[in-house]
């Protein structure tokens, strides 16, 4: 199994995240307009990165947004816009590659404010949730897992555990609009962005 990782913005300074903090907050509160802007920016950078060319060697790409049960997360809308752009791109430029949209089911077990927690608290909290792929992906598919932001990497760890548990050995990729790179910044910085 090979793995790629890509993010548009590397956060190294909490005052200069590389994107509008006001827009990010609007995105977290459901702005489809901002979700589409973020998806377009992420797609444009991703598709121009030559290291991602191996992605199109696969016959199928399945894109997953962050896990949810009934109510989609804000990153769902960004992922859906990205999916539509990638689907249009492959139909014009890579017609041997099919793009599908997948879902990870999540049974959430907590009501705490996730953005205010440390890395260890986050993992201890969400590891009790249950995650499942309703449909096992075909072996020839590459799986792309998207999220708006990676603060501690906890959700990626959960997905990696899910794949290992279910014996899924497909090539995978993790795509983020932004990723916190400066480990000296407290993970509750996510709440600064959210609110």
Image: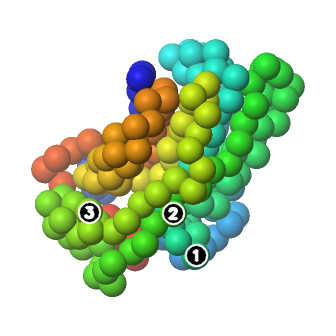
Alpha carbon of mark 2 to alpha carbon of mark 1: how far? Answer: 9 Å
Where is residue 115? Give x, y as percent: 30, 70
Whichever of callouts 2 and 1 sits on the residue coming sooner in the sequence is 1
Q: Residue at x 84, y 29 (%)?
A: 91
The span from disc 2 to disc 3 (Cα, nearest Å) is 14 Å
**Which residue is label 2 attached to?**
105
Report x, y in % for residue 131.
42, 60
The residue wearing badge 1 is: 70
Q: Residues within 10 Å of mark 1 (few under 14, many from 20)?
A: few
Q: Can residue 8 be seen in this view?
A: no
Rendering colour mode: rainbow
Which residue, given by chain and number where applicable, does mark 3 sit on?
127
Q: Which of 182 and 122 is in front in this view?
A: 122
- The quadrant holding residue 123 is bottom left
Q: Position of residue 26 (x, y in %)?
A: 55, 71
Other-residue count near label 3 (Cα within 10 Å), few / some / many at <14 / 14–19 / ≥20: some
Quadrant placement of the N terminus: top left
Q: Is residue 194 visible?
A: yes
Element type where label 2 sits in the image: strand
SS of the residue under disc 3:
loop
Q: Residue at x 75, y 31 (%)?
A: 98
């Amino acid at each position: 199994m090979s793995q790629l990782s890509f993010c548009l913005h590397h956060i190294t300074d909490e005052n200069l995240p590389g994107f509008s903090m006001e827009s990010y907050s609007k995105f977290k509160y459901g702005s489809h307009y901002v979700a589409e802007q973020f998806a377009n920016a992420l797609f444009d950078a991703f598709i121009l990165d030559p290291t991602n060319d191996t992605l199109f060697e696969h016959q199928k790409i399945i894109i997953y947004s962050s896990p949810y049960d009934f109510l989609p997360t804000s990153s769902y809308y960004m992922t859906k816009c990205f999916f539509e752009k990638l689907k249009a791109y492959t139909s014009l430029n890579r017609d041997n590659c099919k793009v599908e949209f997948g879902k990870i089911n999540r049974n959430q077990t907590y009501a705490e404010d996730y953005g205010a927690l440390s890395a260890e608290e986050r993992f201890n909290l969400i590891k009790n949730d249950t995650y499942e792929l309703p449909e096992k992906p075909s072996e020839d598919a590459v799986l792309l897992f998207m999220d708006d932001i990676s603060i501690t990497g906890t959700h990626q760890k959960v997905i990696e555990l899910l794949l290992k548990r279910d014996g899924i050995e497909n090539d995978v990729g993790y795509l983020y609009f932004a990723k916190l790179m400066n480990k000296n910044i407290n993970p509750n910085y996510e709440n600064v962005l959210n609110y």
